[in-house]
Image: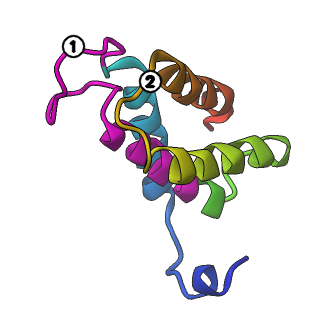
Amino acid sequence: MTECARHLPELDQSVFDMAWKSLCESRYLWDSNIPVEIIHEGNYKCRTVWFQSIVADLQILLLGRQIPDNLKKKVNQFIQWCGRELKTKKRITPEDIRRGDEIIDLVLPFKP
């Protein structure tokens, strides 16, 4: 546990429930199509906000020990990839979206 995490308030189950719900919505309610023009609004997976939402949800679930130990490495690799790669990308690719969908697909079956 990081020094910062030691100072976080105790999270109740409703916070984890919201994170699980948000991940499910990110997977199934956001549009995978990539418009020709760059967009700044709407529920499109090609927006960086989609990735930021996934990362936030995964971090909450990691803090709450909601993700099985055998998936933590893959989840952390995805989080690191987002932090490293998305800063420099001009456009999100279908492969990037697939990667986001895959990490959600890995963890959703473990929703309590």
Residue receiving disc 2:
27
Query: Which residue is at 45% across, 28% downward?
Result: 24
Q: What stretch is highlighted in magenta?
A: 31-60
Are there few (<14), some (14-19), or many (20+) residues within 10 Å of tag 1? few
> Label 1, label 2: how many angstroms apart (C-alpha)?
22 Å
Q: Is residue 73 left or right of residue 90?
A: right
User: Which residue sits at x=69%, y=80%?
Assistant: 2
In depth, the one of 7 and 46 nearer the eye is 46
Residue at position x 83%, y 49% in the image: 69
Q: Residue tagged by mark 1?
A: 36
Label 1 is placed on what type of residue? Val
Height in image: 12 above or below 17?
below
Contact between labelled residues 2 and 1, with CB atoms less than 8 Å apart: no
For mark 2, give the secondary structure.
Answer: helix
Residue 71 in picture, x, y percent from top left: 78, 41
Extreme-right residue of the structure? 70
Q: Earlier in the sequence, mark 1 or mark 2?
A: 2
Query: Which residue type carries mark 2?
Result: Arg
